[in-house]
Image: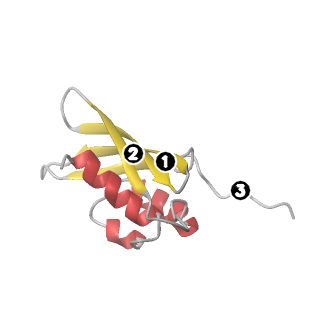
Amino acid sequence: MPPHTVFAERLLAVLSGERPVHWMLGHTVGEAYEQLVRIAPETPLRSLGPRPVLRRCSVQVDDGRTAVEAFATIAVGARVRAMAFRLERGGDQRWRCAAVELDGLGAATRPVPRPA
């Protein structure tokens, strides 16, 4: 299975509540783990019916083959959700997730201050 598909399945498992966020320790780099910590508690890909299914995962590779931008579609019951993520290959040749966004949640998501 290509790395982008493996990571799409891993992210799906975490964002559906099937696996804990710390399962991704060692598989993330930079802000990706913190992004998952912010997104995962809401279990945005949890389904009340059948398990969410990865439908498609497309990829664009940089010229140096050291980074991958991926886009996945996930069926969650009758809904289809979109997930984007970036993989970077380290000096040890292992791929790690560097960023993740789900339907616009992720990199830009910050806690919104509540009015006093």
Q: Earlier in the sequence, mark 1 or mark 2?
A: 2
Kindly tell me whether residue 91 is visible in this rendering: yes
Circle 2: residue type: Phe
At x 43%, y 64%, the residue is 51
Q: With respect to residue 101, does 20 lie above or below? A: below
| Disc 1 element | strand
Quick check: marks 1 and 2 in contact, CB under 8 Å?
yes
Left or right placement of residue 67 versus residue 82 in this view: left
Circle 1: residue type: Glu
Look at mark 2 in the image and give the residue it sits on: 85
Look at mark 3 in the image and give the residue it sits on: 112
Look at mark 1 in the image and give the residue it sits on: 101
| Disc 3 element | loop
Give the percent coordinates (x, y) of residue 8.
34, 52
Residue nearer the viewer, 45 or 76: 76
| Disc 2 element | strand
- Viewer-nearest of discs 3 and 1: 1
> Distance from label 3 to label 2 (Cα)?
23 Å
Residue nearer the viewer, 66 or 58: 58
> Distance from label 3 to label 1 (Cα)?
17 Å
